[in-house]
């Protein structure tokens, strides 16, 4: 298993619930021991989320996740300490693990993300594709990856949500964008 993730357990009971947020409804999916998905409903990827067979609704399983998300959106939390168990290829897991190392309020380019996992700049598109398949948005902060020119590119939740998240974190890319507006 790559990085900071709990090994998958396909046989485990899965649960789901929805929580409200300033960027819209969020769908949480996971097991009793780990979050396996966090999706922004209404976005490009949020409408076709596949829940594991037999998934049960239960908000109590996600009480800690919901509390940490509320603290994040209220500006009281910059790091999450929720056990995570995404499912993906070894390359995707490597990319997602590196995403967890991008500090709050910081942005990097797809090329920099490729470099950080030991891949050449020519791997930027593959890294971008893996980034776009991240099943645990926000907590695995794919929104912190931007274009090499500082532009906000590609985001499964929609670029308006990416911009809101980066503004919330007061990321340098958003500060630079604001400076160009004056």
Image (cartoon, rainbow, N blue to C red):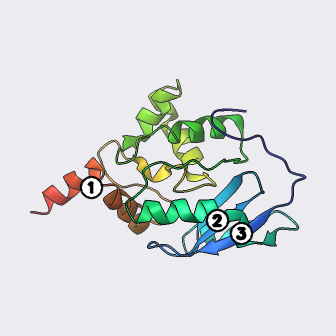
| Distance from Cα at disc 3 to Cα at disc 1 | 35 Å
Of labels 2 and 1, the one closer to you: 2
| Distance from Cα at disc 3 to Cα at disc 2 | 5 Å
Q: Which residue is mark 2?
A: 63
Tell me where residue 87 appears, x and y as whole percent: 73, 47
Of labels 3 and 1, the one closer to you: 3
**Which labelled disc corresponds to residue 60?**
3
The quadrant of the rendering that contains the C terminus is bottom left
Of helix, strand and loop, which one carries label 3? helix
- Cβ atoms at labels 3 and 2 below 8 Å apart: yes
- Locate residue 31: give its quadrant: bottom right
* Residue drawn at x 39%, y 40% as measured from the top left: 109
Q: Earlier in the sequence, mark 2 or mark 1?
A: 2
Q: Which residue is mark 1?
A: 174
Q: Earlier in the sequence, mark 3 or mark 1?
A: 3
Of helix, strand and loop, which one carries label 1? helix
């Amino acid at each position: 298993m790559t990085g900071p993730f709990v090994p998958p357990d396909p046989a485990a009971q899965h649960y789901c619930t929805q929580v409200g947020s300033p960027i819209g409804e969020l769908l949480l999916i996971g097991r009793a021991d780990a979050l396996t998905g966090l999706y922004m409903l209404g976005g490009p990827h949020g409408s076709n989320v596949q829940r594991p067979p037999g998934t049960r609704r239960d908000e109590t399983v996600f009480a800690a996740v919901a509390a940490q998300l509320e603290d994040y959106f209220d500006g009281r939390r910059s790091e999450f300490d929720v056990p995570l168990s995404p499912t993906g290829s070894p390359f995707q897991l490597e990319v997602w693990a590196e995403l967890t190392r991008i500090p709050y309020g910081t942005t990097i380019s797809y090329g920099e993300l490729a470099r950080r996992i030991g891949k050449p700049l020519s791997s930027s598109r593959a890294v971008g594709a893996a980034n776009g398949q991240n099943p645990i948005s926000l907590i695995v902060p794919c929104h912190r990856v931007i274009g090499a020119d500082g532009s906000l590119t590609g985001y499964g939740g929609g670029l308006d949500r990416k911009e809101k998240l980066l503004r919330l974190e007061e990321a340098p890319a958003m500060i630079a964008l604001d400076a160009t507006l004056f």
